[in-house]
Amino acid sequence: MKTTLYVCLLSFLVFGCSSPKSNGEINTEAIETTAPQPEHFFQATDGTYYQLADLIGKRVFINYWATWCKPCIAEMPDIQVAADRLKDENYVFFLVSDQDIDKIKTFEKERGFNLTFAKLNGKIQDLGIQSLPTTMIYNTKGEQIRKITGAVKWDSEDMLTSLRDVQ
């Protein structure tokens, strides 16, 4: 029993988080349609509820992460830089976890990022996400156009150009 549990835990740790891309390649999937979302898709740590439909007209960056995921945490400073550089370009950035809201608030306070942290209404796995971090990009029509698995250098010029190209 202990051996089985150990193997399962080890497998999750190895395959559950994706390390940063060192060669500049990004695993992206073009998405043609957006799956229906619950009425309150996620709640920000300030208490605001969001639905994707509320964000139509904006370009949306949603990064799915967890407090225990080292690659997730490692890419947050780059997300902060990207959010700062794109703040006047009709982008909204969210960092969404399915962990307890108090745990997310504590993390947010301790780390001091100026980003919108939120709790998912449901489980990340229910969205078809198999590893963390995973980022989804939505265009101004509310259509999911990219799904990027693994940590990324969000503040690189190539990535910023890619994000700017989203309509």
Image: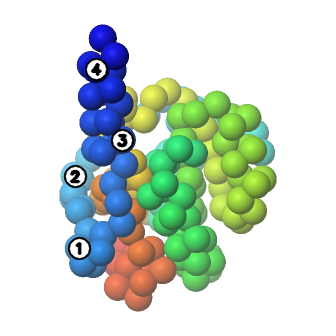
Q: Mark 2 points at which residue?
A: 32
Q: In this view, does 121 lie above or below 113?
A: above
Q: Residue at x 57, y 45 (%)?
A: 67
For marks 2 and 3, the one nearer the N-term is 3
**x, y percent for residue 35:** 32, 37
Q: Which residue lies furthest to the front in this view?
A: 3
Q: Nearer the viewer, residue 55 or 25?
A: 25
Tell me the residue at 27%/19% (across/down): 4
Distance from disc 1 to disc 4, alpha carbons, whole Å, reads 36 Å
Residue 3: which disc? 4
Which image quarter holds the C terminus? bottom left
Marks 2 and 1, how far apart in space? Answer: 22 Å
Look at discs 2 and 3 and give the one toward the viewer: 3
Q: Where is residue 105 in the image (x, y as percent from the top left)?
A: 73, 44
Q: Choose between 105 and 46: the one closer to the eye.
A: 105
Mark 3 touches mark 4? (CB < 8 Å): no
Q: CA separation, marks 2 and 4?
A: 42 Å
Q: Mark 1 points at which residue?
A: 25
Report helix, strand or loop for mark 1.
loop
Percent across and percent down for residue 111 are 71, 59
Which disc is residue 121 wearing? none
Q: Residue at x 41, y 52 (%)?
A: 133
Tell me: 62 left or right of 5.
right
- The picture places residue 57, in percent across and down from the top left corner, at 51, 61
Q: Which of marks 1 and 4 is nearer the N terminus?
A: 4
Give the colour scheme shown. rainbow
Mark toward the start of the polypeptide (3 vs 1) = 3
